[in-house]
Amino acid sequence: MAELICVSPIDGREVVRRETASAAAIAAALTQLRLAQSAWAHVTLGERATILDRFLEIMRAQNEEVTVELAWQIGRPVRYGGEFRSFAERVRYLIDLAPAALTPTLPTDRQVGLTRYIARVPLGIVFVIAPWNFPYLTAVNTIVPALMAGNAVLLKHSAQSLLVGERFQAALDAAGLPSGLFCNMALSHDDTARILSSGSVDHITFTGSVEGGRAIERAAAGSFTACTLELGGKDPAYVRADADLEFAAENIVDGAYFNSGQSCCGIERIYVHENLYDGFVDYFAELTSKYLLGNPLDPETTLGPMAATRFAAVVRAQTADAVAKGGITLIDPAAFAANREGTPYLMPQAVIGVNHSMAIMREENFGPLVGIMKVRDDNEAVRLMNDSDFGLTASLWTADMAAAAAIGARLECGTVFANRCDYVDPGLAWTGVKHTGRGASVGQLGYDGLTRPQSLHLREV
């Protein structure tokens, strides 16, 4: 057995250490999950909802301590109050959606003497591999609909957010979820690969890197295990000539730098119509310079450290590459005393004079760094926004909703926003294209991915 260790980005101290599960413990958990699921599949939706309602209230009651715990684990400032407001809204929506999402569908034609419908049947065991950046929200996207649909859930959380998985387990146990139906385990990459290659789970949901997604697919090859993969991103924003400049800049700054840029759908590249470009750049730089980088436990801090020094090193390297190739940084490092090389404390930065030959406009950095380019018109913006290996979200900033819909139809991404960004709508499908992944979570399509159709054709004699 190996050990998983969470090292705090605040000061490098160890937050928590856990031994990975033994082969015997993994086998026992999988057996128990299968047994518990066979009974849970016959529990009514109302009973499932009652348990998950209790789970939600138990989680919400922990918000204050969890907010501090998250600061220690991933560096998010306590002033933002953790994740539980959005978490509660999402859980509530997903519970309430279940009856409609799981209702059998009938063919449009009717035939005398026949009862015909398509039922949604649980898959069995759903394996959730959750990331550290939004550790509650990303995990609950699958956990709640999976349980509401009648599945069992095995959770592997990131080593950077080990305590999150343990809080899920404790809250679901306290809410009265049947024993063995949900299992949080400390697992190594090798443990995960063995579980997948064995075919002992029925679906896997993974949020992480492109290489991680490829490793998941390789491990599951031949097992016929279904996969939902949310991988890398390089999400663009386009500010049209008719946009409200100040509104766009204020929201894009937040979309680029919240959580130190460590958001799956955070803005990493910005295209601005030439008529607004100069004013946008000036206001964007002014707003960015107002962030306070520091200890996330300080309520005055608005930008905490990245989750690890190695993550900050990637962003610093991308900035240096852009500058070496002619890019110009907008933000003065003198305004950020806490910004220190060789640490996870990294200032927000924006670079102009960039182009698509540079990594800053092509490769994911997952940090507080954006490139800003001037464009002539919608066509140039669309071409550049689509010039990417990734496609999670894109945001359009405009007063013309018809234009937004028309431009959005041309974009190669899973979600198109107009006048907002960095948001997951639980009523829609959260999905990506190209190297961003496959499948969908939340919404009706999220439920569809966690169930299988079964056709009932009942002939009266």
Image (cartoon, rainbow, N blue to C red):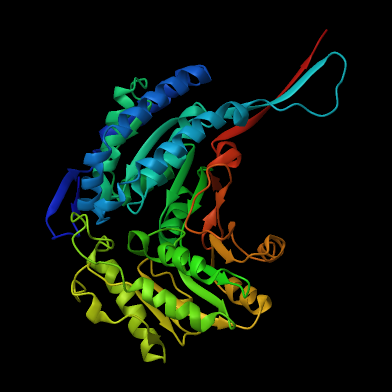
- Give the answer, above or below, for where 413 lies relative to 318: above
Residue 66 lies in quadrant = top left
> Residue 110 location in percent, x, y?
85, 22
Instruction: Kindly indicate the quadrant of the structure image that contains residue 284.
Output: bottom left
Which part of the image, by quadrant, shows the C terminus?
A: top right
The one of 448 and 38 positioned closer to us in this rendering: 448
The N terminus sits in image quarter = top left
Residue 356 visible in rendering: no
Q: Is residue 124 left or right of residue 427?
A: left
Q: Which residue is drawn at the image coordinates 36% and 60% (left, top)?
A: 258
Vertical relation: 379 (above or below) 42: below
Q: Is residue 161 above or below residue 408?
A: above
Q: Position of residue 331 (x, y in %)?
A: 33, 80
Q: Is residue 320 left or right of residue 40?
A: left
Can residue 411 be seen from the camera position used here? yes
Residue sitting farthest toward the top: 461
Q: Is residue 455 left or right of residue 88?
A: right
Relative to 35, is 284 above or below?
Answer: below
Instruction: Determine the residue positioned at 61% across, 73% down.
Output: 240
